[in-house]
Amino acid sequence: MTDNMSRILIVDDDFIFVNELKQVLAAYNQFKVLSATQEGEANTALQNETVAIVVLNIDAPHIDGIEFLGLLSSSHPGTLCIVLSKYEHAVVKEVKKIPLRDSIFLYMKKPSNLKQIGGAILEALHCLDERDYTQGILVSKLLYLVEAATKTCRLNIKFGSKKQATFDILEGALINAAFGSLEGTAAASEILSWPPSSFIVTELPPEYEERINMDDVNTIRVNIRLKRKTGLLSPAAVAEKFDLSKKIKLFIVDDSAMMRKVITNIFADNERIEVVGEAANGVDALQIMPQVKPDVVTLDVQMPIMDGLSTLKRMMIQIPTPTVMLSAYTKGGSRVTYDALKYGAVDFVAKPSKTSDTDLQEQYDELINKVYLAADVDFEAVRYIRAARRNKDVADNKAVNCETIVGIGAAEGSYGTLLKIIPHLSPDLPAAYLVMLYEVPEYVDAFVDYLSELCSLKVQRAVNNESVQGGVCYLASGEEYLTVHAGDNGFVQHLSPAPFAGLRGSINMMFFSMAELMGNHSMAMIVSGLGEDGFEGMREISRVGGKGIVQEPATCLYKEMPESVIKHCEVDKITTDSKMAKVVNAMLS
């Protein structure tokens, strides 16, 4: 047995099981196998050896599995853990529904076929080698394990260098949470949205308060999942975000009289949105709009006399107005949607329909939110930017040198922004472009195909282990991690599934890898989107001497991402979406 073998630590007080598993693992001839039947022995083994994988029986009566997981997360974050249980806990079944790529690599019912564990260890070692996981334990997953253990304790949770919080647990149930000035459900909502974190276990203080019940926790979990999936807040919450001293004037363009009535009725009781007019086609719309001067327009695509896209192009020249495409044809991934955004629409939504999988009221709420958001977009963003004429010879030429890597972090409301940036990036500058777009992979694929027809710059999907070439723009989905590394003949992409895509760390991961690899030859850009992903990576790029560019929040449909960067980072340029490509080209020249 050589000293460079990976150390595997089995933590279980079942002597027979431990010995049988050690024999199975010895047959692989790849591991140095350690074992501990008590928590003290396990702690000593971790102190004396560099352990790669821990196999932990969380039900062992002489080992506090939760405390031991806390030790791993806080003192040995690079160690992965395979959690075993003799019982199929009902709540722990929920753990299996969460992508298992934090420090808890896998949860398994204690198997009779021990080779299953051997196979899981080999997979975990591969995960370690590829760094295809996030150190720490997801708090929502931890709660399931604590509930299964019916533990009473205080969990002291830490994320990064500044965020610290506590969860009070009584017989497995979360009864209180605290983070800064927040307590109870408000604190729990914040903490459960964190990426994988470290924690330690202490005793529950005798003066504890019960301010949360498990029904609240389950509601929080559902709300977090929904928010991560759609970014949709209630119309009232969206309305309160804006200073609307006067009503938003809405104009409806649709050839269906029934649909115009439906849309009008949706806003009938809204105190902040007033329907000021309607038209059955584009010609009528262009005649009426200068008289009523709407703040927002909803526009159908298929109409007689003048269709929606033709109307939109003329509208952006004659009377530029924030426009939400409202059609059966406008949905994510469709060419019509991209055309509309290219011509100046700020957003899109499908027409309300009883045949949709979504409840009608949710569809109505989404439309109301889109109108609020559109009304808050600055005039500068409401314009049609003609794409640069595509030079196929340039696009198909051999890639130029890659001396700089430019990363773009994009999320909700960013399609239109990217259509104003990517087609105008110069293909002959010595730079490669990485775009992390929070959209499902199939929509990113469709967007790549669309951009490829517009751009002289070569546009393609990011692919694992392929080289990074100058003069090429690579797009990845927010459900993936895209990082760059040094290869034998230049720079190489590494693409892997994001372990917790809903937690939104893909932009930071991309920026961090750029900073490490390229130093002051890296450039980061943040455009429209929800949440705060990107500011930590942007700050790191700034620290190593790279450049930072942020879309002017006033021109964003969703302002949170750029606002968080401006709040936390010193950036080189804040500019409108229509000028961002020009700024990049100038900085690279």
Image (cartoon, rainbow, N blue to C red):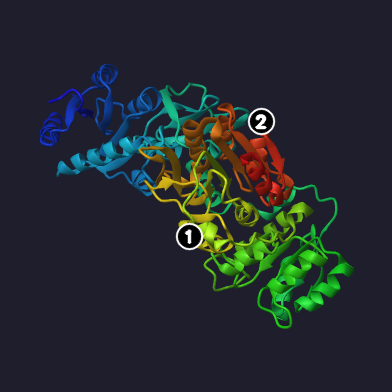
Q: Quadrant of residue 391?
A: bottom right
Q: Residue 331 at x, y = what percent?
A: 57, 66
Q: Residue 479 vs residue 67: left or right?
A: right
Q: Residues within 10 Å of mark 1 (few under 14, many from 20)?
A: some
Q: Position of residue 30 (x, y in %)?
A: 17, 33
Q: Amino acid at mark 2?
A: Glu
Residue 101 screen position, x and y as percent: 37, 41
Q: Residues within 10 Å of mark 2 (few under 14, many from 20)?
A: some
Q: Is residue 577 above or below residue 189?
A: below
The answer to whether any part of residue 275 appears in the image is: no
Q: Which residue is mark 2?
A: 570
Instruction: Please say if the residues under marks 1 and 2 sit with CB atoms less than 8 Å apart.
Output: no
Q: Nearer the viewer, residue 428 or 35?
A: 428
Q: Quadrant of the N terminus?
A: top left
> Left of 532 or right of it: where is 84?
left
Question: Going 45% across and 41% down the picture, which residue do you hit?
Answer: 483
Q: Secondary structure at mark 1?
A: helix
Can you name the residue that lies furthest to the right here? Answer: 291
Q: Is residue 379 above or below residue 280?
A: above
